[in-house]
Amino acid sequence: MIDPTTAIRRRDLLAGGVGLTTLAAMPAWAQQHGVSPRAELTGPDITLTIARQHMMIDGKPYHAIGINGSAPAPLIRLREGQRVRITVVNALDEETSIHWHGLLLPFQMDGVPGISFPGIPAGGRFTYEFPVVQAGTYWYHSHSGLQEQEGLYGPIVIDPAGTDPIASDREHVVLLSDHSPLHPHAIFRRLKMQGGYFNYQKQTLAGLLAGKDQPLRERLDWGRMRMDPSDVSDVTGSTYRYLVNGHGPADNWTGLFAPGERVRLRLVNASAMTNFNIRIPGLALTVVQADGQDVRPVTVDELQIAVAETYDLIVTPTEDRAYTLVAETWDRSGMARGTLAPRMGMAAPVPALRPRPLATMKDMGMGGMDHGAMASGCSPEHAAMGHCQPGAAPEMDHGQMSHKMRDFANAPGLPRTPVVQTVAPMPVDRTGEPPQGLADAGHRVLTYRDLVSARVNPDTRTPSRALTIHLTGNMERYMWAFDGVKLNAVTAPIPFRLGERVRVTLVNDTMMAHPIHLHGHFFELVTGHGNHAPRKHTVNVAPGGTATFDLTADSEGDWAFHCHMLYHMHAGMMQVVTVRRDADKGAAA
């Protein structure tokens, strides 16, 4: 899958005066021994220079965009309460930008070209200046074109102003990402030609005969609906290398520990298109922070980290041996792998990839159906009225079901555009379920409902209004949007009054999960925890599911709101949220 137009040639390296020793250079925080204070960019004044370079993955050189000569970019370490000035120098031959993902700051400093500032032109520079008003694990990345896919991302750690309530003896940043030898625009062109272009895990006759795939009848039903249940991830291990701190699986990034230590792992999913399932065989994972916000400790064996999310974990290895950090892709087409060990050079067994998941009728938005009644063909209410006999099971016509998915009865306001290929007939809240493919993991898996804020939420008011937003798409034409309208066709932003409290429900009318990110704000997930609802800046909305959050629009300005699957955003799943003062009162509502 190497595109000859982007493959690195030996004469390119010689012409550029780049030796393999230079190519192998990594920021010290990402090297085998984990976080190193020498690699951290700190203090009130920081300079970042963005330029094209190469990076080594599993012993091979690849094109990349980096910062200060390293890809991934350097770790920025700040302290809550300080003020920081970050000057970004653009040494590229194109516009660039840096967005501070999850940081609360003035919108002019948010770093989204065309929304919060003009962008940084080729050869230019821009100084971001803002107060640091929070603590936790965050990250930064380009918001220009598809540069993020080329390596323009790095971690941010903000220490609390006082004593850290999360006690640990040692910490490691674990930055997960995906990288391809294909140029990102080449990837996008292939997706536009065929939405399932990179899916090499389609169902086969051999799988049917071996009983590993769907039964023949179900397969025929999906065929009549012209849908592929194996199409879980748009871009897969057929072109991606999956990385831990810039290292491929063969590189075996290693973080050290001493037996008995409490080790804090700061997980960041900086990938373009990949959700990862995280586990460390032999170790329990205690989740203590989500999206930089402290949560009550919850212990699990596995969790899924969606694109753009962060989780902080505590692990306590007591044995003098190595442990494998497994970051298996959600479609099981590949794996990022690292090691926790008491000494360098150690390794533990690496588990094989598990069978790839298949989409279900629930992923098609049919989760609210009474499947018992469907099986009998007669609901208890209709049987009581004498309209039918229980046990009379009609044949399920999934072709008609496909037409029902295009019925706009559940979303009468959606436009009849090509970007609305399906409308989920019965979407349900799936925040209490293990993420896609993990329902039968056989051990404890984190769900959103397991997350409980460690502190009372800063705003406990009842929302004054409700807003529903549909996540829509067309896989055949690779088009994505909010409410059936792509960003380039939006005529007005999504308006909020400064200070108002709004309940927002996201309805996923597609068969793909979408990690939805709102800039400049945190919101509280409505998961039954009252005033201790988990606060997040990104929420992964399951296929055919819903997710609801309460938002206090407390930061005036224009803010990006988008799916953080990079190619979904690029294809149109993005809008602008405006927060304005009440014109009549001239003050916060």
Image: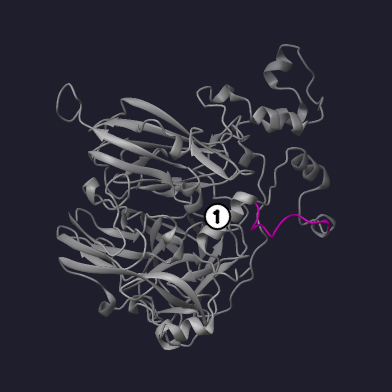
| Residue sitting at x 46%, y 47% | 569
Please say whether residue 410 is visible from this viewpoint.
yes
Q: How is the image coloured?
A: one colour
User: Is residue 145 depicted above or below 342 in this figure?
Assistant: above
Q: In this view, does 263 lie to the left or right of 458?
A: right
| Residue sitting at x 64%, y 31% | 405
Residue 154 in the image: state x and y as whole percent.
Answer: 35, 66
User: Is residue 337 depicted above or below 420 in this figure?
Assistant: below
- Looking at the rendered structure, the secondary structure element under dot 1 is helix
* Of 19 and 426, the residue lying toward us: 19
Q: Is residue 182 left or right of residue 492?
A: right
Please say whether residue 533 is visible from this viewpoint.
no
Q: Badge 1 is on which residue?
A: 188
Residue at the far top in the pictured view = 385
The N terminus sits in image quarter:
bottom right
Asked which quadrant contains residue 84, the reply is bottom left
Whether residue 197 is in magenta: the answer is: yes
Residue 297 in the image: state x and y as whole percent.
Answer: 37, 56
| Badge 1 density bin: few <14, some 14–19, many ≥20, Cα 10 Å | many
Q: In this view, does 564 lie to the left or right of 473?
A: left
* Of 439 and 266, the residue lying toward us: 266
Residue at the far right in the pictured view = 209
Residue 212 in the image: state x and y as whole percent.
Answer: 76, 57
User: Is residue 358 depicted above or below 245 in this figure?
Assistant: above
Residue type for callout 1: Phe
| Residue sitting at x 32%, y 50% | 112
The region drawn magenta spans: 196-205
Whether residue 102 is in magenta: the answer is: no
* Of 580 and 115, the residue lying toward us: 115
User: Is residue 366 depicted above or below 158 in this figure?
Assistant: above
Magenta segment's dominant SS is loop
